[in-house]
Image: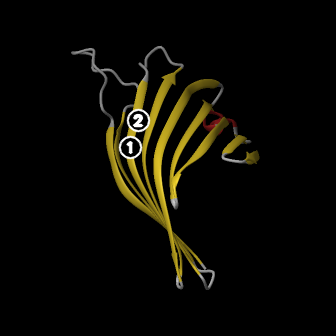
Amino acid sequence: RITLQAAGGVIYGKWTGFFGVLQQKYSKTDNEGLNTQVLYFGGSGRFNLGGTRDFLLTYVFTDLNVGPNDYAQMHTISPAYETRSEDDKGKYTHQFALDLTSKNFASDTQVDGSQYALRWTYKKDKTNNNKFESIFAYGTSTEGVEDAATGKKVQDYNLAGELEDVTK
């Protein structure tokens, strides 16, 4: 398996822009259906609401290809509210966001899907360089599957969980 990736970004005042590409190719012909190409780009703005409170707005476009075919294009918008504090033990950040994703599938057998999630991110940066980040999200996702009997989108799954990252 060969993986190539590149990413970049630029920050100007309260604005951030970013982009990236990834290509993963398998050498065995049996695995060609797993070959993946991802292209993404987006931007965000941070608007101060006074003191240590900010409103953030982020947009991300993602184009995903699997095997030799197009798979989906996704548009995500994430409005968020962030608070920050600091004391003699470190710096703390709380971010409350709503992630809204529209999925446009290339296959004629799939209808467009969506994903919605409420997200809380907590970050702690201690003065002794220990870092901790916890993300809790709850939401729903549809992957473009339609119920043959009703013609309605099938909700593929609910999502709820927590991801923790401790860096020393």
Q: Residue at x 22, y 15 (%)?
A: 150
Residue count near mark 1 (Cα–Cα under 10 Å), binned few <14, some 14–19, many ≥20? many
Q: Position of residue 9 (x, y in %)?
A: 75, 46
Q: Which residue is mark 1?
A: 117
Q: Residue furthest front?
A: 50
Say above or below: 58 vs 94: above
User: How many other residues sit within 10 Å of disc 2, few (<14), some (14-19) or many (≥20)?
Assistant: many
- Identify the mark at residue 115; answer none if there is no mark: 2
- Residue 140 circle label: none
What amino acid does circle 2 point to?
Answer: Gln
Callout 1, which amino acid? Answer: Ala
Say above or below: 79 vs 73.
below
Q: Nearer the viewer, residue 20 or 89?
A: 89
**Residue 149: which quarter of the image?**
top left
Q: Secondary structure at mark 2?
A: strand
Q: Residue at x 61, y 85 (%)?
A: 128
User: Label 2 near label 1: C-beta < 8 Å?
Assistant: yes
Does residue 138 appear left or right of residue 44 in this picture?
left
